[in-house]
Image (cartoon, coloured by chain):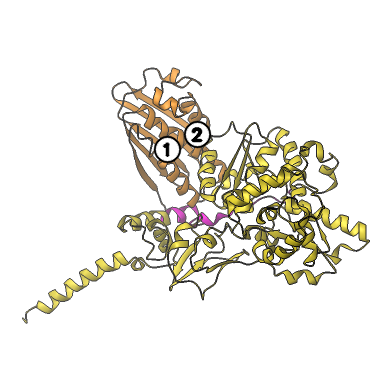
Chain colours: A yellow, B orange
Amino acid sequence: MEQMKRYHSVRLDKTRCKGCTNCLKHCPTEAIRVRNGRAHIIDERCIDCGECIRICDYHAKVAITDDISVIHGYKYAIALPAPSLYGQFKNLKSFGPVLEALKKIGFDDVFEVARGADIVSRAVREKLREPGLPRPLISSACPAVVRLIQERFPDLIPHIVDVRQPMEVAAMIARQEFCRKHDCPPEDVGVFFITPCPAKMTAIRNPIGQEKSAVDGAISMMEIYGLLLPHVAALQNNPTETTATYYGIRWAAGSGEANVVCPENSLAVDGIQNVIRVLEEIENNRLNDLTFFEGSACLCGCVGGPLAFENNYLGKRAIRKLSNTASKRHPVDDVPASMLTKYPLYFDQPIEANSVMKLDDNLVVAMQKMERMNAILESLPGYDCGSCGSPTCRTFAEDVVRGYCSEMGCIHKLKDQLKVMAQQMVELAQTKRE
Amino acid sequence: MSAFIHTVYPVASGDYTRAGEASADIKRKLKQLGVASMVLRRVAVASYEVELNLVIHSMGGELILEVDEKGISLTSQDVGPGIPDISMAMKEGYSTANEEARSLGFGAGMGLPNMKRNADGFEIDSELGKGTRISMRFNLV
């Protein structure tokens, strides 16, 4: 129903969808419509935040990720566990069991994304010292938040810090180190992110700020959890230690980045609706005394991802406990300065605005559509009931103007129209013969 | 072919629960019209400031958004009390905001200077006991 297709991970399982209005009402970018009794995701608008996956009682919203069998397509496979993975196991006392369990299920090597987060932390710290950048600088770590800004806050794009995601940095280093150690060509090595969210999957297929992702695929944490569980239990006393610091591990549970790059003047907000509210404030210049803003689409940060198994608050607690067993050395001291130039840590492509909110490319036509939209809106009851399949009366008016549905799609308007018609029929029937 | 957007937002004095709603709607409209980011940001800042000024300082009034092909006009018209000394009010850091407003974090005395800085055209006219009218213009071409 909408323009050109853009790849994104969140999809609808038509066989499970009942056509209710739950997802409709919870989508932060108004990207869902119910048509012919089924939900439809407007690809151009979806930012893969996963809110609809969480809210759907029928499990009709799914995230497309790679099947674990994808690793067999390469001679060697490296796992890149998101730090949130450590928060999925109860009573974990050290990192060894998880890191080694990944090798038991088929990976040849493991490189921690938490280590990537340490390196990114150092790079972002440097960025904050660069003169002439707008305030606050906004974290680029959560791809759903970056997509949200591209779509709803295009004027804030210059605020986004142009440092790549920890997953990307980890992938580059992992592949290079593996190839050197095993003397093999890079194409022999597949690098796979163990993801808590669909937005990261999309960020691999459709990278932000870079031409091509260094990651070859994303495997859902939910899918891999069951496979890892028996091995994690059997490896309880494995002595392998984490290569990341306390700070890198804490990136998993919200505010981790803000706390390490700018503890003195940063703000971390979690939950997509909360992030929207604060971005509005930044847009109004009400936070121009703030140095750094970290927004996470999910409550509690990545441990709250729609593909994470554990309850987000339990996951957050687990991460906090476990991070205390890691080195407390600050990434500024722990990551050598040479790292900042050794790998391409920065964006080399501009972040483009997504102009999907625009009614028309031509200003005059857009104004005419807006006038019509306002006239339609005034004729609607304002119940925001969702029966028409659009989330609110306002979006319904917009959909009519965009040509996606007709005004009689509003059942309340239809009822009024029927009443008039019925009255006319009665009058017609009562007309006496002349 | 021509078109003209004209929207009036009534703003009540002291209504902090609804403060910011008019400027939020203005932002959404301008995004739907495809107004360039640089202009949008300036209108966002100015419209929020002017709306909050109506809530904090005025006895009530309205905010009027007008858009044509050439630009955006933002007009604030209130019914009083009027500004005794406009040149003083235009100074950065000067504020007459009351305790309630200050406790909510407003009243830094940057409202009017911020508006002027962000708009391409700025006019202010005030009469004690009658009211204040602020007109701002943002060029699109």
Q: Chain of mark 2?
A: B
Please state the extent of the stretch shown in magenta in the rendering.
A347-368
Give the spatial CA distance, label 2 vs label 1.
9 Å
- Residue A112: x and y in percent read 77, 53
The answer to whether residue A255 is left or right of residue A29 is right
Q: Nearer the viewer, residue A81 or B23?
A: A81
Q: Which residue does the numbered mark 2 point to in the structure image?
A: B119
The answer to whether residue A122 is left or right of residue A385 is right
Q: Nearer the viewer, residue B131 or A118?
A: A118
Between discs 2 and 1, the one toward the N terminus: 1
Q: Amino acid at mark 1?
A: Leu
Q: Which residue does the numbered mark 1 point to in the structure image?
A: B74
> In the rendered structure, are the residues bearing label 2 and label 1 in contact, judged by CB atoms less than 8 Å apart?
yes
Secondary structure beneath label 2: loop
Tell me if I can see residue A86 in this picture: yes
- Residue A39: x and y in percent read 48, 68
- Furthest residue in direction right, as rendered: A183
Residue at 79% in and 49% down: A242
Residue at 57% in and 48% down: A154
Q: Chain of mark 1?
A: B
Q: Nearer the viewer, residue A333 or A235?
A: A235
Same subunit, labels 2 and 1: the answer reads yes
Mark 2 nearby-residue class (10 Å; few <14, some 14–19, many ≥20) = many
Image vertical order of residue A41 relative to residue A257, above or below? below
Q: Magenta includes A341?
A: no
Q: Nearer the viewer, residue A30 or A428?
A: A30
Mark 1 nearby-residue class (10 Å; few <14, some 14–19, many ≥20) = many
Q: Magenta includes A352?
A: yes
Q: Amino acid at mark 2?
A: Ala
Image vertical order of residue A14 relative to residue B84, above or below? below
Secondary structure beneath label 1: strand
Query: Picture quarter containing residue A6?
Result: bottom right
